[in-house]
């Protein structure tokens, strides 16, 4: 069985599209776990009507992505005998064979613990949204591979990659029992990169399956008003992700690249966006630096239990 964990906040209109595509799946052995972050719309009622066998976890407030999905994962591990857990944004639409393709992939790729899928733009379906998550070798920044590129089949090869976007990603249930959960201090943004990095350190592998296709309304659950918040959180969480996960030799060698990448990014904010956005980014960076010391114990734990070499990790980065 697959436990499908869906974080939600006032997303009933998105859920209508998502639930219709779930009902059309060729693979039927799944349970819906909706984790609601204090919605004021009809998300509860609609979910109960569409899926009477559903589980609804009401957080009562906007707890962020990481806390919400963790609650769903923990519920699944404690109460359901699900071999796999699918994390799914509410603003998705799935191809009918989406679940079946993932299950078959797990059966064929025995050493895969995470499956990344092919996400296309919901509104323009020949444009890529995400074909697997990577870290750039040139500056150490996370990227969604292929984002905004026209889909010409350039990412149609099945392969092992760095990580999966948690907007739509499959996990073997056992990985959470051994690698832990998503870092709730991240609140939102880069928590999936952080988890993928930790999983790789522990020897778990992520397999990219381009035949599992879904369509994402990127930004569907946020708004322009949150752009400054998103920028600030990304900058903060980038600092925390690095100090937690980078093997020491790579962390030291990459310091000049980290610095250059930030200068370029901040210049772009000032030159092409706004000074206010630059300030939010710089504020996020400073918050990360101030918060950094709290992640040192986690770093020691992860690096002590690391199962792979620094060279292996570096080989997962992309140009």
Image: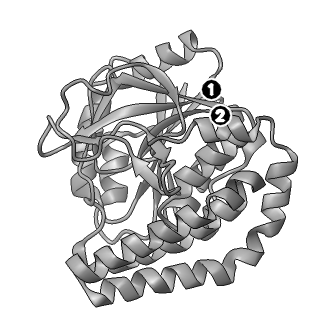
Q: Where 313 falls versus 27 (above or below)?
A: below
View extreme (right): residue? 304
Which residue is tagged 2?
Answer: 173
Residue at point 85% right, 58% down? 300
On the image, the x and y values in percent for residue 11 come to: 29, 59
Q: Earlier in the sequence, mark 1 or mark 2?
A: 1
Quarter of the figure that contains the C terminus: top left
Spatial distance from mark 1 to mark 2, Cα to Cα?
6 Å
Which residue is tagged 1?
Answer: 83
Q: 10 Å neighbourhood of mark 2: few (<14), some, or many (≥20)? A: many
**Residue 107 versus residue 250: which sits nearer the camera?**
250
Residue at point 68% right, 32% down? 204
Find numbered disc 2 in the image and state the secondary structure of the residue it sits on: helix
Q: Where 16 falls versus 241 (above or below)?
A: above
Q: Residue 62: which numbered mark, if any?
A: none
Find numbered disc 1 in the image and state the secondary structure of the residue it sits on: loop
Q: Where 254 falls versus 237 (above or below)?
A: above
Q: 10 Å neighbourhood of mark 1: few (<14), some, or many (≥20)? A: some
On the image, the x and y values in percent for residue 43 come to: 33, 58
Residue at point 46% right, 66% down? 261
Contact flag, marks 1 and 2 (Cβ < 8 Å): yes
The mark tally for this picture is 2
Name the quadrant containing residue 256: bottom right
């Amino acid at each position: 069985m697959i436990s499908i964990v869906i974080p939600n906040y006032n997303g009933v209109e998105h859920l209508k599209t998502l639930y219709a595509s779930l009902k059309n799946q060729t693979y039927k052995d799944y349970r819906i776990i909706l984790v609601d972050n204090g919605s004021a719309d009809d998300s509860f009622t609609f979910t109960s009507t569409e899926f009477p066998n559903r589980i609804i976890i009401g957080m009562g407030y906007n707890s962020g992505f990481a806390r919400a999905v963790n609650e769903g994962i923990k519920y699944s591990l404690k109460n359901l005998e699900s071999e796999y857990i699918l994390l799914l944004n509410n603003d998705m639409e799935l191809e009918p064979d989406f679940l079946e393709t993932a299950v078959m992939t797990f059966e064929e790729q025995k050493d895969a613990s995470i499956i990344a899928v092919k996400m296309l733009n919901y509104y323009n379906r020949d444009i890529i949204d995400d074909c697997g998550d990577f870290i750039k070798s040139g500056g150490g920044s996370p990227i969604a591979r292929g984002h905004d590129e026209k889909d010409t089949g350039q990412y149609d090869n099945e392969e092992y990659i760095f990580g999966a976007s948690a907007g739509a990603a499959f996990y073997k249930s056992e990985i959470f029992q051994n690698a832990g959960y998503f870092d709730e201090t991240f609140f939102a943004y880069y928590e999936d990169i952080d988890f993928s990095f930790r999983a790789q350190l522990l020897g778990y592998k992520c397999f990219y399956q381009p035949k599992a296709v879904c369509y994402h309304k990127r930004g569907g659950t946020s708004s322009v008003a949150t752009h400054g918040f998103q920028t600030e959180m990304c900058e903060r969480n980038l600092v925390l992700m690095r100090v937690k996960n980078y093997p020491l030799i790579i962390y030291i060698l990459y310091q000049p690249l980290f610095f250059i990448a930030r200068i370029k990014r901040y210049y772009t904010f000032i030159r092409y966006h706004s000074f206010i956005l630059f300030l939010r980014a710089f504020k996020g960076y400073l918050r990360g630096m101030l918060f950094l010391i709290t992640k040192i114990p986690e770093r020691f734990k992860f690096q002590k239990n690391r199962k792979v070499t620094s060279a292996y990790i570096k080989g997962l980065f992309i140009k």
